[in-house]
Amino acid sequence: MKKSGIKKVIINGAAGKMGQAIARLIKENPQLELEIAGGREPGDGFDMHGDIIIDFSSPEGAQDAFNWAKEHKAACLIGTTNLPERFLFQMQEEHKIPLFYAPNVSLSVYFFGQLLQKASQMYAGYDRALHEIHHTHKKDAPSGTAKKLAELINFPVEKITYERVGEVPGTHQLMLTTPYDKITLTHEAASRDLFAASAVQIAAWLVKRPAGFYTMSDYAKAVLKLCKKGQN
C-alpha cells in the first residue's frame, strides 16, 4: 500500500556514483517524502512505476528517461550534461509534465554563476580566464558547468581551460587580472554529495510542481522566497 504523500523515485543511471549517492541520500532524508521505486541503466527496460525519474546517465539515457516520463505523465529531473541541441530545444518546449534540466544542479554553483556575472561587470577592464578541474572519469571537456558559466559572462567557450585529475568532484575558477593585481573567484565542491543532495531536494520540489519546463533559476527563486518567508 502506498504511503500517504510519499512519491516514488526511479533513478536512471543508478549504478553510477551520482546514482548511488542520490539513492543513499533519499534513504537518509525521509522528511522529503521520497522513496526509491527502482533503478536502471540506459538500455534496460522500464518495468517499474514512479512519480518522478532522476537522470544522471548519458545523453541517450536522458532521452530515454524523458520519453518514459512523458508516456507515464511523471515528473523528470535531468542532470546529465553534453546533451544534443535538438534535445535541449525539445525539453524547453515541454508543457505536459514537470521537467527540470540543469547542467549543474547545485544551488551554490548557481549563485556562483550570478556572482561571476557581477564580477565581470564590476571589473570590466580586466583580462579574464575561466578554468575548471574534474575527475579523470568525466567524459566531456570542458564541463557543462564551465560552458554555462562562460555563457553567463559572455566568455568564449573555446578559451575555457580544464584539467582532469584524480577524483576531483568539481572546481571552477574565474581569474581577473591586470598588470597590477589579480582576483580569483573559486567554487570547489568537497564531494559529489553536494550535487546529489541538491538533486534530491529539487526532486522533492519538482514532483509537486505543475507541468512545465523548470531550471535552476526557478528553483532558486522558490528557495529564496521560502527563506524570505521564514525571516518574516
Image: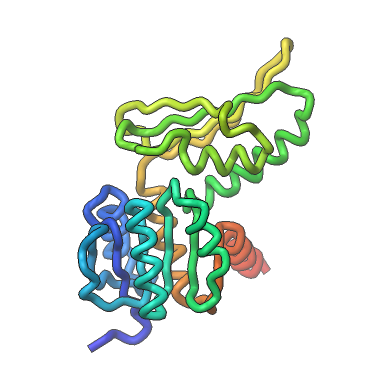
Q: Is residue 75 above or below residue 112?
A: below
Locate residue 214, reporting x and y percent.
55, 65
Residue positioned 28% across, 56% down in the render: 13
Q: How is the image coloured?
A: rainbow
Residue positioned 25% across, 72% down in the render: 37
Locate residue 103, reporting x and y percent.
48, 50
The quadrant holding residue 227 is: bottom right
- Please state if 9 lies on the left or on the right of 186 as rendered: left
Residue positioned 71% across, 35% down in the render: 119
Q: Is residue 60 above or below residue 92?
A: above
Q: Quadrant of the C terminus?
A: bottom right
Q: Quadrant of the N terminus?
A: bottom left
Q: Is residue 140 above or below residue 1?
A: above
Residue positioned 38% across, 73% down in the render: 69
Judged from this view, the residue extending furthest toward the top is: 179
The quadrant holding residue 126 is: top right
Judged from this view, the residue extending furthest toward the front is: 86
Viewer can see residue 31: no
198 or 77, which lies in front?
77
Q: Is residue 54 above or below residue 147?
A: below
Viewer can see residue 21: yes
Locate residue 120, reporting x and y percent.
72, 34
228 or 63, which lies in front?
63
Number of numbered discs visible in the structure rendering:
0
